[in-house]
Image: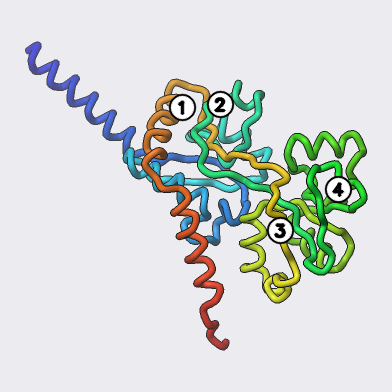
Amino acid sequence: MRIARLCVLLLCVALAASADAARPLRLATLNWAPYVAPGLDQQGLSAYIIGSAARQFGRALEIDYFPWNRALQLGLHGPGYAGYFPAYYTEQRARECYFSSPIGTSTLGLAYLKSAPVHWRRLEDLAPFMIGVVAGYSSGAEFDRLVAQQKLTIDPSPNDTLNLRKLLAGRVQAVVIDRLVMRFLLLAEPDLRKQRRRLALSSRPVAELPLYVCFRRTPEGRQLQRKFDAALQTLPLHAMENRYFGKLEGNANAPQADH
C-alpha cells in the first residue's frame, strides 16, 4: 500500500512539473518597433531573443501589448504574467522585480541633417541647438539632468517618427533616437525612406541603456529568471540582431507587387 501511495505521489509531482513546463512564458509589453511589435517577424527583435531563450527551457513565449505604465502593472501583478519587457534598470525596479541578464542595449544617438551637421564632444556642447525628444522617455541620466537644469533645449513629440519628420523639415536641429529604432523607421516609413540619405546618426552615443526582462519578485519569478539567464548565455545576441535586420532590409528592398 505504501509503495502504491508513493507511486501515486511521484506521478502527481511529475504531472505537475510537466504542466508547469508546458505553460507559456507570458510577458506584458508595449508596442516599440523594432524591439517588439505585433506586426513584425517574430514580434520584434527583443521578442525573438526572449522566445529563443524560453524555448531552451521548454516554454513558448506569449506576449500581450499595453500602454507602458499598464504593462508594468500587469507584468508585476496581473494573474498569469511572469513579468514585463523591455525594461531599463532603475533602483526602484530592482526592488520590485528580478532583472534578467541584458537582452540587448538601447543605444541612443543624435540624428541630424548631413547638410547641417551637429558637432559635439560633451552633452553641454548641444546647448545652442533645439533637440527633438519623445515626451515621457528617458534620454539617459546625464541628458535628462541637463534638461532639468535648463542647460539643454528640447522639443518633445509623441513619437520618433514625428521627430524625424520635424528634423527633415528644419523644425529642430537634432533628435535623440535609439539607433535601431531609427534604422527601422528609415526602412518602414515610406516618406522617411525616400529621404534617409539626408540623415545621419552620431557615432558618439548620447546614452547606452541595457534592456532587460523584469521577472516578478516571487519564488517562481526567481526560478524563471535563473533558467532564462542560463539559456540567454548560449545565444549569439549580436549575430541574431544582424540576422534579424538583414531579413528586414531584404524584405524592404524586395520589389512590391502592383495592386
Q: Distance between the residues labelled 3 and 2?
A: 34 Å
Which mark is nearer the camera, 3 or 1?
3
Q: Quadrant of the C terminus?
A: bottom right
Q: Position of residue 17 (x, y in %)?
A: 28, 29
Residue that extends furthest to the top in the rendered view of this protein = 2
Disc 3 residue crowd, few under 14, some 14–19, many 20+, Cα 10 Å: many
Disc assigned to residue 97: 2
Q: Position of residue 201 (x, y in %)?
A: 71, 58
Disc 1 residue crowd, few under 14, some 14–19, many 20+, Cα 10 Å: many
What is the count of numbered marks?
4
Q: Are marks 1 and 2 in contact (CB under 8 Å)?
A: yes
Q: How far apart are marks 4 and 1 (CA)?
A: 43 Å
Disc 2 residue crowd, few under 14, some 14–19, many 20+, Cα 10 Å: many
Q: How far apart are marks 4 and 3 (CA)?
A: 15 Å
Kind of residue indicated by mark 4: Leu
Kind of residue indicated by mark 1: Gly
What residue does disc 1 label? 221
Task: Give the mark nearer the N terminus: 4 vs 3.
Answer: 4
Which mark is nearer the camera, 4 or 2?
4
Q: In this view, does 231 lie to the left or right of 111?
A: left
Q: Quadrant of residue 199?
A: bottom right
At 28% from the left edge and 28% from the top edge, which residue is drawn? 16
Q: How far apart are marks 1 and 2 (CA)?
A: 8 Å
Task: Give the mark nearer the N terminus: 4 vs 1.
Answer: 4
Q: Is mark 1 on a helix, strand or loop?
A: helix
Which mark is nearer the camera, 4 or 1?
4
Disc assigned to residue 123: none
Task: Give the mark nearer the N terminus: 3 vs 2.
Answer: 2
Q: What element carries label 3?
A: strand
Q: How far apart are marks 4 and 2 (CA)?
A: 36 Å
